[in-house]
Amino acid sequence: MLTTDDIKILIKKYALQNAVKYNKLPQAGSVMGKVMAAPELRTRAKEINSLVGEVLDEINNMSPDLWEQELNRLAPELIAELKEKKEPEKGLPPLDIKGLLVMRFAPNPNGPPTIGSSRGIVVNSEYTKKYKGKFIIRFDDTDPATKRPMLEAYHWYLDDCEWLGAKPDEVVIASDRIPKYYEVAEQLIKKGGAYVCFCEQEEFKALKDEKKACLHRGKDVEENLTLWKKMLSGEFKEQGAVLRIKTDISHKDPAIRDWVAFRIIKTPHPRPEVADKYNAWPLLDFEGAVEDHLLGTTLIIRGKDLTDSETRQRYIYKYMGWKYPETMHWGRVQIHEFGKLSTSGLKKAIADGTYTGWDDPRVPTIRALRRRGIRSEALRKFMIELGLGETDISISLDTLYAEDRKIIDP
């Protein structure tokens, strides 16, 4: 059994390795995670949590210049481990292109573009420039209730794209194209690939978890078409019915089993051109799947956490006889200075006066960077050099500031 002193040394090793790697005092949670990976220590979490605090205080009182020296004394193998880890390749890998390259960046305009958004804007536009392709901005704005679009955000996205040197070749607004989604939904019903379901959410979940079909799944095409038309005409109340894509009810992943393609939303859309024109609204996986086909998208770059979306969408493509676009995945990027800030959280903080607006220098938006005087070339280069690796990465804005200084004083 490890003594308290043994555990403190172990904590110090991992804490110093983290400090050397990121050149800053580590977070307690990061060190705890490494230490608690040892099975024999998992029952001593309370004790270890206290010891981590003590060790971090000790390291905080050391000069950062001595961190690597101390780590080398305690655990030279951890220094070697840091040096052996392959640095991710910088820049964008070449593509094997056959025909016209068509790529899209598809934001929900429920807030302005963030620093994270700039990665999608820059990388997609850079590839289409390099291979003389087509770059599309598509506003996925078909949720007027939960992720309600902001009217100003449509302009903000296009303005920030232009500032980044990524002016799109085409702009598409999904809420303008609802009839196209209705047409595809009707075709899917006729092919036996979709059905109207009246199950309560919890009722369907219970059946789905047991890999059982609900009683609505077996209705014939004509009945489903009649019910679908009633959904469109507004005869059902909100949450009264949904249109589901018929998949594999025994699929190993419950999220794939007969997923919802359309739901009834009575909240008017903020765009006056749309307002209360429609009752049935497509969910993102349906709308995005149809749009990628209609727009002729040939390559999609999406987060590795969205592989379920591709699996769901492929059912539509199979029913319709369409070819699914090539897909690449990348890992998440976390900016040290901002942590986890959601658009909804920022909206609330702006409303209560914590921030002065979407261009407040303390918020992670492109507009805020512009207000701080960051040059677009610096942000563009910063995002290109991140590359397309699937490993999640954590970076500091210091790198962006360094790129900006190079432009000012090359």
Image: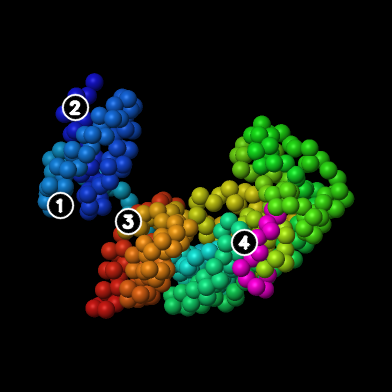
Specify the amino acid type for callout 3: His
Give the residue at x 34% y 68%.
361
In 3D space, how far apart are the residues under numbered discs 4 and 2 (Cα atoms)? 56 Å
Residue under circle 2? 4
Outermost residue on the right side: it is 222
Q: Is residue 266 magenta?
A: yes
- The vertical placement of 176 against 41, above or below, is below
Residue bounds of the magenta highlight: 262-274
Residue under circle 1? 64
Residue 110 visible in the picture:
yes
Q: Which mark is residue 220?
A: none
Specify the amino acid type for callout 2: Thr
Look at discs 2 and 1 and give the one toward the viewer.
Answer: 2
Look at discs 3 and 1 and give the one toward the viewer.
Answer: 3
Q: Are marks 4 and 3 in contact (CB under 8 Å)?
A: no
Please, what secondary structure does the residue beneath circle 4 have?
A: loop
Q: Earlier in the sequence, mark 3 or mark 2?
A: 2
Residue under circle 4? 144
Q: Earlier in the sequence, mark 4 or mark 3?
A: 4
Instruction: Tally the marks.
Output: 4
Q: Earlier in the sequence, mark 3 or mark 1?
A: 1
- Counting other residues with Cα less than 10 Å from the Cα at mark 2, is it few (<14), some (14-19), or many (20 or more)? few
